[in-house]
Image (cartoon, grey):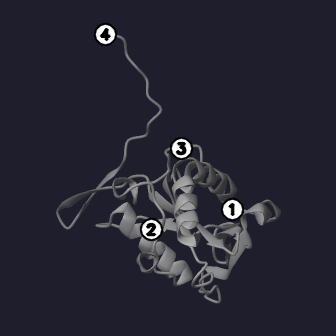
Amino acid sequence: MEKIKFNNRPNPCHTINGKMIWESRSTAVVAVIFGKFRGETYVLLEKRSKIMDQPGKWCVPCGYLDWDESGQEAIIREVYEETSIYLPNYKSFFVSKSRSWLPFFVNTDPSENRQNIALSYGFVYDFNKTGLPDTSFSNLEIDELRWVKLNDVAGYDVAFNHDVRIIQAEIYLEKDILPWWKWLIKKTLC
């Protein structure tokens, strides 16, 4: 039998209090949140503070999956911690209930120094009745929040290739979700 060589590096195992705990790659969660308001499409961006990786750059809400939490729970928690926006309070437009909380993109490329696995989620909200949610929130990790017109994102210094994730989300949502959203808005307005 031919010996096949793989690029992997085995995950180390640690014994803590008699339990085997495996150290493995981290799973990041990324939330691309689009807001429809007065005929424009906005995306929620946050400016990273000086204590964070890539300080002063802009990104979409993101963070890490914690123990005992699903991707859905992690994205809800991270968005809330970084923006004070609680996603379940808003009705998002999705393809179907079965696809509501599935990521539109999963990155497992180990070329980045932290070797994260990233689950990217996309959301589209209609804020025409309520207005865009408040962005006055900040914390130690986030210096500023801002709803940015989709066409203006190119003018921002963006961290973690999140500008690419925004484009990917836009393509995914335009193809699969926005036609339904446009139909619903037309129906509502008529």
Question: Which residue type does callout 2 highlight?
Answer: Ile
Q: Disc 2 or 4, which lies upstream in sequence?
A: 4
Three-letter amino acid code at the position of disc 3: Pro
Q: As drawn, is 123 to the left or to the right of 152?
A: left
Q: x, y percentage for residue 3?
A: 37, 16
| Quadrant of residue 162 within the rendered picture | bottom right
Which residue is identified by label 4? 1
What numbered label is drawn on residue 159?
1
- Mark 1 to mark 3: distance in Å? 17 Å
Identify which residue, 88 or 139, lies in the foreground.
88
Q: CA distance from mark 2 to mark 3?
A: 22 Å
Element type where label 2 sits in the image = helix
**Which image quarter holds the N terminus?**
top left
Residue at horizontal 44 percent and vertical 36 percent from the top? 8
Instruction: Give the SS element for disc 3.
Output: loop
Q: Is residue 23 above or below residue 136?
A: above
> How far is disc 1 from disc 2 in space, using C-alphas?
18 Å
- Find residue 132 and report its horizontal and vertical position in percent: 62, 81
State the image coordinates of residue 24 (x, y, percent, origin top left): 39, 52
Q: Earlier in the sequence, mark 1 or mark 4?
A: 4
Residue picked out by circle 3? 110
